[in-house]
Image (cartoon, rainbow, N blue to C red):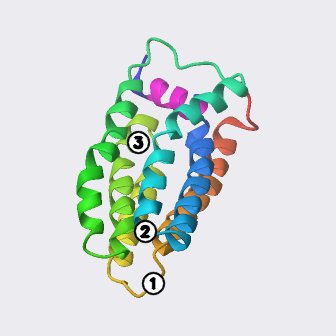
Amino acid sequence: MTHAEMTREMRHTHLMAVPGALYDVLIWTSAGLIANAVSPKAGFVALFLLGVTIYPVQLLVNWMLKRHPVSPQNNLGPLFMQSSFIIPASVPLLWAASALGPEWTFAGYLIIVGVHYFPFVYAYGHWVFWPMGLLQVLLGMWVSQHPEWAPGTGAFLGAATFVVYAVVASLIYRREFGAARR
């Protein structure tokens, strides 16, 4: 398979990661609500624990929609796993940063999650992951400068980025593949 064929297959099989992004909206919103109602640390833990379920949920959605798995000749699958380890490997750093103030609870997460999207440009073969990642990095930097905001604000802004991504990626998918076909 050529790289173009592999990336096209990834975009098609995983629906441009839209189901995962929609699940992210629920996760980040939940974490923000928990941060505001309980504590920023509780929101942090919720985001981490729910976050580790994103890829399995994406696979479950693929199975429920009877999506064909990626072909064995497509060697891009490991890149997703490798880039996904950026987030849990960063948790000790994120936890320490959150000690600087509640604004860092989700600011750090936004930055790390944004950075983890950059390899998706190669794996999905699409530019849309550059602005998605950059938006999250910049939002994380912005949130970090506003300790006066409610603790969950960074999480709600993170959820908003996933809403925007899901809309844009859905349009891209429909243009390339038409309605969600198998």
Secondary structure under tag 2 reads helix
105 with respect to 28 (left or right)? left
Instruction: Check the image and report above or below for 3 versus 40.
Output: above
Instruction: Check the image and report above or below for 77 versus 136.
Output: above
Question: Residue reaching furthest top?
Answer: 72
Which mark, residue 40?
A: 2
**Residue lying at 27% horizontally and 50% vertically, measured from the top left:** 90
- Closest to the observer, 142 or 39: 39
- Closest to the observer, 82 or 68: 82
**Residue lying at 44% horizontally and 18% vertically, measured from the top left:** 74
Residue that badge 3 annotates: 120
Residue 30, position as x, y percentages in the image = 58, 59
* Nearest-to-viewer mark from 3 and 1: 1
Distance CA(mark 3)–CA(mark 2): 29 Å
Q: Is residue 134 visible?
A: no
Q: Amino acid at mark 2?
A: Pro
Span shown in magenta: 4-12
Residue 80, position as x, y percentages in the image = 40, 33
Which mark, residue 149?
A: 1
Question: Residue reaching furthest front?
Answer: 38
